[in-house]
Every structure is written in C-alpha cells, then in structure tokens.
Amino acid sequence: MTITAAVPGVQTPACTAAGAAPKPTSAPPPAARSLFRHVHIENLAAGLSGGVISTLVLHPLDLVKIRFAVSDGLELRPKYNGILHCLSTIWKHEGLRGLYQGVTPNMWGAGASWGLYFFFYNAIKAYKTEDKLESLGATEHLVSAAEAGAMTLCITNPIWVTKTRLVLQYEAGVDPSKRQYKGMIDALIKIYKCEGIRGLYKGFVPGLFGTSHGALQFMAYEELKSKYNKRGNRPSDSKLSTLEYITMAALSKIFAVSATYPYQVVRARLQDQHNRYSGLVDVIHRTWRKEGIHGFYKGIVPNVIRVTPACCITFVVYEKVSRLLLGFKNGN
C-alpha cells in the first residue's frame, strides 16, 4: 500500500480494491461572487428601446418644458402664454422641424440613459439579492437605483448638455444663419473647444441630486409591484398585464416628479447658453430672489404631461422586450 501525503486543497486518492481507479468525490469549487455574472445585455437593449420610442413620441413636450424652465425674463426669449400657445407658435414659425429641435441628442440621451439605467440597476439588484431568500426592501431598492443613476449620469451628461443647447436655439428654425450649433456632434465639438470638459459636464452636480428622482421612482415602482403581487398571493416577480404596468409606472413617476422637480430647473439653467451663472448656489440664489418658489417649478405641467406617458411607454416596452429577449435566450 502506498502512502501519500495530504496536500491542502488536493483530493487524496482513497485505497481501492484490486487497484480500481478512484472515483472523484469532490464538487467543483463555487464560482467567485461577481457583479458581472448578473449583467444581462437584454436589459440594456430593452431599456434603450423604451427610451427611444417614448422620446420620438413626446419630444415636443420636452422642448416646451425646457423653454419654460429657463424662462427668466431675458428679452431674447420668446414669450409663451401656455403649453398650447408655445406648441402652436413654434409650429407656425418653425414647422415640425422646430418642434423636434434637439431630438437627436434627446434620443441618444434617453435611449442610453434608460438602457444603462436598467442595465446597471438590474445587475446591482441581482448582486445584492444573491444568496438571500427574501427580496430587497424599499431602502435597498432606493440605494440600488441611486447607484445606477450616478453611474449612468457619468456617461450621459454631455449628451444632455447638447440637447439643452439645441432646444434653446430659438430662431434656428426661422433663420438657419442664427443656428449656433448644426447638430449633436457639432455641439459636442464646439462646447468642448470653447468650454472644455467642464462645459460638457455643466449641470452634473444637480444631475447627481437628480438621481434621487430615478431612485424614488424605481423604489416606488418595485414596491407597488411587490405589494400588488403580495395582495394577489402571487410571486413578487410575476408577470403583470400591460394596463397594470402602465398604472404602476404612472403612479411611481408622478410621485418622483413631484418630489424632485426643482433640480431640473436648476440643471437646465446651468446648461443654458444665453445666461451665465457662477455655479449651483448662484442659480438657486438668483432664481429664489427674482422668481420665488414658483421659479423652481416652471415647466412642471408640460413635464408631468410628457414624462408620465413617456414613463409608461418606456416601462411597458422595457418589460415586453426584456421578456421577449430573455425568452429567446432561454429557448422558450
């Protein structure tokens, strides 16, 4: 009989009758716990699809919201009496092209933001629920969504700056010679040349505060779905009907907008090429001094009218496309 020294981490062969080969008895070591194991490209594709489709449908209302948000009394700005007057005025003077100024960076921004947001959020959420029997609570959903939002903003902020600049080219549709930027790429290049990397990241700090918007929205969405399924004695990840998804998305979006809208006004004003502020505090101080609390909620009506259906479209498209893609992947 041969005696072998035991080596840590190595299976020592047992003595077997008639020299028979030993049978392996150890299971393969568990895979290392990694965030990348929870990354699914389907979430990115589904979120991108939802963001692009909702933007194409509702961009004119986004344009109106931004123009109202930066309306601070400067003489160069057109005066609008309301949403319909703004839309009809732009249509009359600039046509359909005027209503869709800035749509290219908006599609890129919304598509990338929603795609990356769902991509990061689902990976973070899956990572945190690994080895846990119960689903995440409200606070964990909030933190996961905030982390995903911050990661997304680091990538997409330059796109949002170009969108704001293009949307605020007031007379570009009437007189092309007054167009400061020809398009998204031209805007990115000119902003970088004239203002450097700092120009491309204007509004980043209030944007970080704005991640609370997405965090509150996703927390509310997840909690509503969970409570609804629990009430119906169904698993927390049960598939809902289109109408149920729309209801959950709308309620969560209205809640988030109501709680966080002022940051959007502050960010739009920082990114505005027609006015100059020394920073975040200066925007807040001047807005409060000249316009009061009302100034921080300018544009909220067109924003709610736009983002609620936009959110519903995005979430429904996301849920349907992600299930379709995952079904293909799993061979179902």
Image (spheres, rainbow, N blue to C red):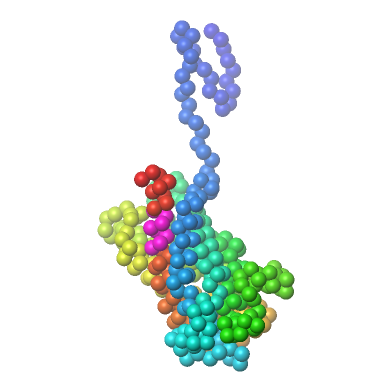
The quadrant of the rendering that contains the C terminus is top left
Residue drawn at the location 59% of the way across and 76% of the way down: 166
Q: Between residues 48 and 30, which one lies in front from this camera angle? A: 48
Q: Give the prevailing secondary structure in the magenta stretch.
A: helix
Number of callouts = 0
Query: x%, y% of residue 219?
Result: 43, 64
Is the residue 128 above or below the residue 152 in the image? above
Q: Between residues 49 and 153, which one lies in front from this camera angle? A: 49
Per the rendered image, the range of residues in magenta is 316-323
State yes or no: residue 319 in magenta.
yes
Is the residue 295 above or below the residue 131 in the image? below
The answer, for residue 23, to whether it is visible in the render is yes
Residue drawn at the location 48% of the way across and 65% of the way down: 52
State yes or no: residue 142 in magenta.
no
Query: x%, y% of residue 59?
Result: 48, 74
Query: x%, y% of residue 205?
Result: 61, 71
Is 21 positioned to the left or the right of 271 in the image?
Answer: left
Quarter of image, res 138:
bottom left
Query: x%, y% of residue 60?
Result: 48, 78
Residue drawn at the location 55% of the way across and 89% of the way down: 78
Residue drawn at the location 32% of the way across and 59% of the way down: 240
Q: Between residues 5 and 299, which one lies in front from this camera angle? A: 299
The answer, for residue 288, to whether it is visible in the render is no
Q: Between residues 237 and 58, which one lies in front from this camera angle? A: 58
The single residue placed furthest to the left in the displayed view is 232
Is 18 positioned to the left or the right of 7 in the image?
Answer: left
